[in-house]
Image: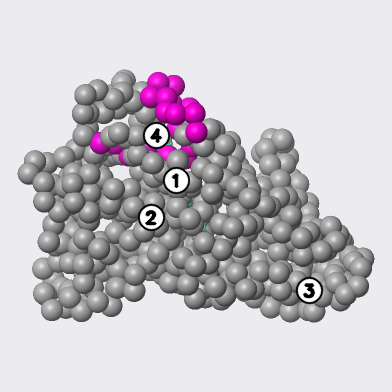
Amino acid sequence: MLPIFSETKRVGIVGAAYRLQLSKDPKVEVHLYEVDGRVGGRVKTHRFTSEKNQYFEAGAMRIPDTRMHAPTLNLIRLLKDTHHAGLNLIPYLLTTPGNRIFINGILKNVSDHNTAMALGFNLPEPYNNQTADALLLSAIESFLDLLGRDFEAGWKLLMKYDKVSFRAYLLDLNWPESVIDFVETMCSQTNQFALSFSELVMQNMDFSTKAWLTLEDGMDKLPQALAGVVGMDNITFSARVQKIEQENDQVKVYADTPGGRVEGTFDKIVLAIPPSALRMIPERPRWDPTKEQAIRAMYFEALYKIGIRFKTRFWEHVQPPSIGGQSTTDLPIRWIVYPSYGINSDGPGVLLLYSWNTDASVWSSIPFSERLRSSLCHLSKVFKDIDVFDQFITAEDLAWSEHNPTGDAMFFPGQFSQYFDIARRPEANIYFAGEHLSRHHTWITGAIDSGRSTAQDIITSFTSKPCPTGWIPRAGVEPEDYYDSEAYRRKVAMDGLEGFKGDRKGFEDSILHSSLG
Ligand SMILES: Cc1cc2nc3c(=O)[nH]c(=O)nc-3n(C[C@H](O)[C@H](O)[C@H](O)COP(=O)(O)OP(=O)(O)OC[C@H]3O[C@@H](n4cnc5c(N)ncnc54)[C@H](O)[C@@H]3O)c2cc1C
């Protein structure tokens, strides 16, 4: 059953990352405005050459294989089934035993018993002989357990502690500062524990996952496949939205393109852009002070990635080899990420160096030539047995703080409880979406969740009736059967697979029916 409203409604969407949900309804015409010349936003694959595996993910790179991330995984499977999109999920290795650790000038392997003492820290007893992972788990295990069993109950509990930082919570457990610094250095990045308790618990819930996936040949295949479903004619690229005007029951959007200013009139619009981008729209309505405060304040942490292409995949030939996974260091490069694609292949390969928060910000202070020199210099401290300068071919980097999202949402203490509902609240016919407006910050799943719940609000406003239960679930929650690819496959098999392939209406109806169960 489709939501019923008599005339076709027009919805404008600013920001073209994950905007499928509305386009599946035949009574809603969608038009997207995207400032870049590509879709994807923070999903961005950089390809050095067109040869196999010569790329790195400058944005999103991995998906935990958990129920919480089913929105992303099932969307990929669905697109693959219905649109022949070349979307192949392959294993992503988060850590492997050969991965080196380089802390306080000491070189170890992940598989060693890496206690504080062994890594050159000098902590009070009983902490000195413990690993950072074990200490961290002891502090948050009960929260992880509850979130895993009952997400809503776990979330309620998290919100009780939302106003404290993760560091304050650990101090409350009587952890000495030096112990907190040790765990932060090993399990996180510099100053992350100053962020909210709830963010850090959510982050650790995801990173405690054992099985991970990524897309073969690049994550940007996902937004490209979605753009195909939306239809390229429905996207205006290189269009920076500069003005939004509410007039009677309609909203007007004005965007600057290389060919001049374009405009569109809509029944509703969705501002699916990060708060930093929203603030930079020079002419837009002003909302009440609490909403404006939320837009100003919601904290995004800096993220920095540099991909370096080498003549060989030397990290797979050292002893012990790094076959995927990542190395932790306390150097400015922080994490060395070994590709999970193309393992054991011959010829050149690409390494990724990745930092967050304060560790990421420092890179913006120097030009690219210095970033590269510093990266290679630090890398050579971890790989003393390799001449990385001789191995070097080329590199590319992306400091996200220098681009419109500025990074990923990681809230300060109290920002979830104080700003979340206000920031998501529609303002007449203007709606809001994005990963920062979900409970699952820093993940594609968060962006999809938020897109769904905004779509639900819009459809409900058109129909004046609530959407059918389960059609679009609440953010962060994935009913067992929603986008259930098994159920979907059975249905496709029954109706005749061939009839559906490449057929947009069939695709849309089948999502709707399978989600209605
Ligand atoms: C370095 C990095 C690593 C990450 N790693 C992972 C990972 O491993 N796994 C994972 O699931 N997620 C990861 N993420 C997070 C994930 O990429 C984001 O949560 C998700 O892509 C956010 O989607 P979004 O639609 O909310 O915002 P965005 O992707 O930022 O989309 C917003 C869009 O709006 C456009 N825009 C902005 N202003 C305007 C304007 N005025 N007019 C028109 N268009 C405009 C932008 O160009 C952009 O395309 C990572 C992100 C980064 C940066």
Residues tagged 1 and 2 counted as in contact (Cβ below 8 A): no
Residue 289 on the magenta span: yes
Q: Quadrant of residue 111?
A: bottom right
Helix or strand or loop: what does disc 1 sit on?
helix
Q: To which residue does mark 2 refer?
A: 448
Instruction: Give the mark nearer the N terminus: 3 vs 2.
Output: 3
Q: Could you tell me which residue is drawn at 49 percent across and 67 percent down? A: 153
Q: Could you tell me which residue is drawn at 7 percent across and 44 percent down? A: 6
* Label 1 to label 4: alpha-carbon separation: 27 Å
* Label 1 to label 3: alpha-carbon separation: 38 Å
Asked if residue 383 lies left or right of residue 342, the reply is right
Q: To which residue does mark 1 refer?
A: 421
Residues drawn in magenta: 268-290
**Residue 105 percent location from the top left of the image:** 87, 61
Q: Could you tell me which residue is drawn at 43 percent across and 61 percent down? A: 476
**Residue 73 percent location from the top left of the image:** 39, 67
Q: To which residue does mark 3 refer?
A: 131
* Label 1 to label 2: alpha-carbon separation: 17 Å
Image quarter (top left, top right, bottom left or bottom right) of the C terminus: bottom left
Residue 417 on the magenta span: no
Residues tagged 1 and 4 counted as in contact (Cβ below 8 A): no
Which mark is drawn over residue 35? 4
Instruction: Give the mark nearer the N terminus: 1 vs 2.
Output: 1
